[in-house]
Image (cartoon, coloured by chain):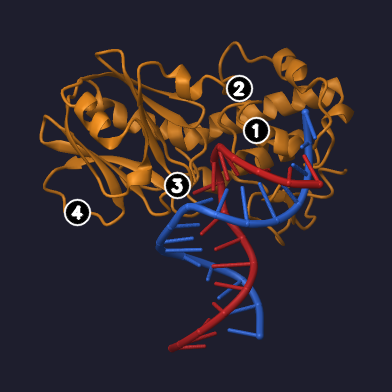
Chain colours: A orange, B blue, C red
Amino acid sequence: MPELPEVETTVRALRPFITNQTFTEMRNYWPRHIATPSFDDFQARLHGQEVESVGRRGKYLLFNLDSGDVLIVHLKMTGHLAIVSQETPPDKYAHTVFGLANGQEMRFRDTRKFGRVYLVADAEEIVGKLGPEPLSDAYTAAVMKERINGRWRAIKPLLLDQHFLAGVGNIYADESLFHARIHPKRPCDTLSDDEIGRLYTAVRKVLQEGIDREGATIGTYRKPDGQRGDMQNALRVFRRTGEPCYDCGTIIERIVLGGRSTHFCPACQPI
DNA sequence: ACCGGAGCCTGTTAGC
DNA sequence: TGCTAACAGGCTCCGG
């Protein structure tokens, strides 16, 4: 579910409620949620630590703690984080719960159980191999071009590769390629400089719009407060199979690429 | 380097 | 209405 805009929305919503709060006891009902260290070590080490700041790298949430440790959460497909009162009735899908000294708790709800939490001394242990942040000043069209250079595979699976670029998932990959007017199967080494420039602009535009609209609620994604995002109303091709293209009226098609559903307009995005 | 397939999980939706 | 199969926003591992 959550891609960069959904994770960023989650970070921004949690920030005022978690910053300067202190973790107390932690509960876990699904052991595989705990990636590292062991639950006993995790719980003992986290207890008493204060959150100094909250950030994001790719699709990972980073809670920077006063000891220098970092609590890292990946929401994967169905993860959801919320801060609620301890009095809030239990939730059968809140498999990991972080107690806070102010009487509230941060609940990691995750129906499909793919999510993971990490507690490390250096975030680089977990996020160190990610590609660049697409919205950072350092990420320019020249950087994208240089990182595409020498590859020949289809452009869409490359966009989904977190080592190539951090944070783009299935929704924003399809939307970016539509805006750039590039067919998802186009081999990287056939892209012109102009096309790479369009793709660069499209990726940043679509991700920024996703943040501005606080994420896309298509399936289960909700903001931490349970409200829907608004980006689903601005999607041009994603999950619009069989419907007319807003720009030219041609029917949107769906193919499977790299094992993922891929949506595009065959007229606007010719092969 | 790249591709396809399986696996991790459970809920929802499409189709008969 | 009821059952079944397909499908889901992520990612890793394996063999070819």
Q: How far, Cα to Cα, is label 4 from label 2?
A: 38 Å
Q: Which of marks 4 and 1 is nearer the N terminus?
A: 4
Q: Which of marks 4 and 2 is nearer the N terminus?
A: 4
Of all chains, the one bearing label 1 is A
- Toward which corner of the image does residue A167 lie, by quadrant? top right
Q: How far, Cα to Cα, is label 2 from label 1?
A: 8 Å
Q: Name the residue under label 4.
A: A90
Mark 4 crowdedness (10 Å alpha carbons): few <14, some 14-19, many ≥20: few
Say which residue appears at 49% left-offset and 32% top-offset: A59
Q: Are marks 2 and 1 in contact (CB under 8 Å)?
A: yes
Q: Which residue occupies the foreground of this view, A253 or A169?
A: A169
Give the amino acid at mark 4. Answer: Pro
Q: Which residue occupies the foreground of this view, A172 or A33?
A: A33
Q: How far, Cα to Cα, is label 3 from label 1?
A: 18 Å
Of all chains, the one bearing label 4 is A
Q: What element carries label 3?
A: loop
Exactly how many numbered labels are in the figure? 4
Label of residue A114 in the image: 3
One can see residue A99 in this view = yes
Of all chains, the one bearing label 3 is A
Q: Do the residues labelled 4 and 2 touch (CB within 8 Å)?
A: no
Q: Mark 2 points at which residue?
A: A131
Judge if badges 2 and 1 mark residues of a common chain. yes
Task: Give residue A253's position: percent from left, percent from top.
Answer: 76, 56
Q: Mark 1 points at which residue?
A: A161
Judge if badges 2 and 3 mark residues of a common chain. yes
Which mark lies nearer to you, 2 or 3?
3
Mark 1 crowdedness (10 Å alpha carbons): few <14, some 14-19, many ≥20: some
